Structure formats: structure tokens, C-alpha cells
Amino acid sequence: MSNTTSNSHSSGSLTDVGPGRWTLDPGGTSARIQNRTIWGLVNVKGVFTKVSGEGEVLAGGGAHGSITIDAASLDTKNTKRDVHLRSADFFDVDKYPSIVFTATGVTPVGDGTVQVTGELTVLGVSRALSFTAEAAEISTDAVTLSAELPVDRKEFGMTWSQANMIKPLTLVTLTARFVRQSS
């Protein structure tokens, strides 16, 4: 859960951010996955290199927005595996080019954390998702949220697993840096 840019951390509260429109900063954002394979003995890791998004902070401190991941941008540092992960066995990027998380509610809960509720859409299948994210940066112009959450790929119809080599849970690590849009 590392942020790829060097940011000054603020001890401000998420409720101090103030209302407005926000855009995802690709340079300060990372979307990573890892999954145990070969009967749990090997940990395969990958990063999605193309992520976009936007959001809105409301007057009461709550927020909503969306993050879109280009499924074909997955890079595991193994070309043959990446081609297979982009195929119909997994992300089927020709048919479903995007993975989308739509946050319907982002509510500050204290101690620099927020409760995030929304819907994750993978392979055209949408499922409710709720998790807690930590604020790594809080200022009037930028907010960085980080979360690590397990996602059951079978819930989205992603069931391919030769000889049951791949565990169904994928660990998703997301660091999302949003910057205030200028008026």
C-alpha cells in the first residue's frame, strides 16, 4: 500500500476537506492484486497501470465517486501470464475492457479512516462492496485513501483454475489520490 509520490501528510480531518469535485491523480494512484496459486505456495502479484476516476465531496463531509481500471493494463511481469489473464479465462478484456468501482457513500468514521460502500463491476457482474480505507494524505487540495481488501473472483464468474491451482480470493490493494478540480 505504498503511494508512488512523495506527499506531505496532514493531520487534518477528512471533514475539513470541504465540498467540491475531485479527479483521480494517476501518478499518486496504484491498483494492485495478488493471488495465491499452485495450491497456495506461490503468490502472483500484478499492477493495473491505467486507472482513472472522479468524485465529489459533499457539504456534510461524505462523498461519492468512481474508479475505472483498464483491465488490459494488468502487468504481472510475465508476458505469457498477462496474455492469459487478459483472455476469456479471466478478465476477458475484449468483451469487458473496464473494471469499475462506484462508491455510493464515503463517510468519515474518525482517526483518519472512512467507510466506503459501493458496487464493484467485473466481467459485467456487479456486487456490493463495503470496506474501510485509511487516509494517508489530507489537505484542501488532495486526499489519498488506501485500502486492502479480499475479493472472491468466483462471485464475478471468474472460475478458471486448472487442477484447483488458484485460490478464489484475490487481495486487492488500492491507493487512490484525488486532487481538487479547479473551478
Image (tube, rainbow, N blue to C red):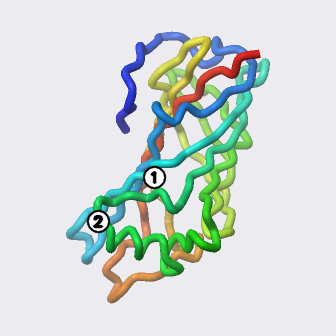
**Residue lying farthest bottom?**
163
> Could you tell me residue 101's position as x and y percent?
64, 50
Q: Residue 78 — which label? A: 2
Tag count in the figure?
Answer: 2
> Could you tell me residue 173's position as x and y percent?
43, 47
- Quadrant the C terminus occupies: top right
Q: Residue at x 29, y 65 (%)?
A: 78
Q: Is residue 55 above or below residue 40?
A: above
* Residue at the disc numbered 1: 48
- Quadrant the N terminus occupies: top left
What is the C-alpha distance between the residues marked 2 and 1? 14 Å
> Could you tell me the amino acid type at mark 2?
Asn
Q: Secondary structure at mark 2?
A: loop
Q: Is residue 93 left or right of residue 9?
A: right
> Could you tell me residue 153's position as x and y percent?
50, 69
Q: Secondary structure at mark 1?
A: strand
Q: Is residue 103 left or right of residue 51?
A: right
Q: Is disc 2 in contact with disc 1, using a CB cutoff of under 8 Å?
A: no
Q: Residue at x 68, y 53 (%)?
A: 119
User: If you read the primary sequence from the N terminus, does the residue marked by circle 2 or circle 1 appear first?
Assistant: 1
Q: Residue at x 62, y 70 (%)?
A: 123
- Crowding at dot 2, Cα within 10 Å, few <14 / some 14-19 / many 20+, comes out as few
Q: Is residue 175 above or below residue 61?
A: below
- Please tell me which residue lies in front, 126 or 109: 126
> Could you tell me residue 130's position as x and y percent?
61, 48
- Crowding at dot 1, Cα within 10 Å, few <14 / some 14-19 / many 20+, comes out as some
Q: Is residue 133 above or below residue 36?
A: above
> Could you tell me the amino acid type at mark 1?
Phe
Q: Residue 35 — which label? A: none
**Residue lying farthest left?**
41
